[in-house]
Amino acid sequence: QVQLVESGGGLVQPGGSLRLSCAASGFTFRNFAMRWYRQAPGKERELVAGISSSGDSTNYAESVKGRFTISRDNTKKTVLLQMNSLKPEDTATYSCNVYFQWRDYWGQGTQVTVSS
């Protein structure tokens, strides 16, 4: 079965950095695009970043462009989200996502809190 397991969240001061990781299993990872989403309390889930199956193409929400970088390692079946220059408004639960066999799969999420 598809499993997505996120890690790397935590508490960080404004301006700091975190690196999130998502370990995938249960599907042929190298064949599928991957995405990071986030959801803050009381807000809708939003797409943060996406990466193509090969890693050649990426896209970002306007709010994170220039600060976040998505990457993947198809050998290790992981997708990463490097987050720099973090702001309080980046506080949210971050989840990775894959659309596989006509449905979305999500990990359990990892909490990122940006606060002084």
Image (spheres, rainbow, N blue to C red):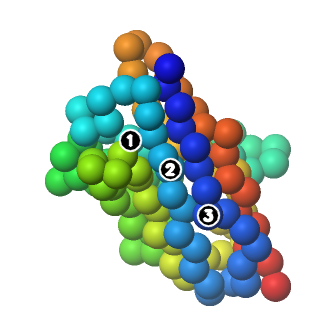
Give left or right: position of 72 versus 26: left
Residue shown at 59% from the left, 50% from the top:
6
Task: Say which element carries label 2.
Answer: strand
Residue shown at 58% from the left, 43% from the top:
5
Give left or right: position of 110 versus 81: right
| Quadrant for the C terminus in the image | bottom right
Of the residues shown, which amino acid type is indicated by label 1?
Met
- Viewer-proximal residue, 37 or 26? 26
Residue for badge 2: 22
**Upstream in sequence: badge 3 or badge 1:** 3
Q: State yes or no: discs 1 and 2 in contact (Cβ < 8 Å).
A: yes
Percent across and percent down for residue 88 are 72, 72
Give left or right: position of 31 versus 10: left
Label 3 to label 1, Cα distance in Å?
A: 17 Å
Circle 1 Cα neighbour tier, 10 Å, few/some/many (<14 / 14–19 / ≥20): many
Task: Say which element carries label 1.
Answer: strand
Of the residues shown, which amino acid type is indicated by label 3?
Gly
Which of discs 1 and 2 lies nearer the camera? The answer is 2
- Viewer-proximal residue, 91 or 24? 24
Residue for badge 3: 8
Percent across and percent down for residue 80 are 43, 59
Residue for badge 1: 34
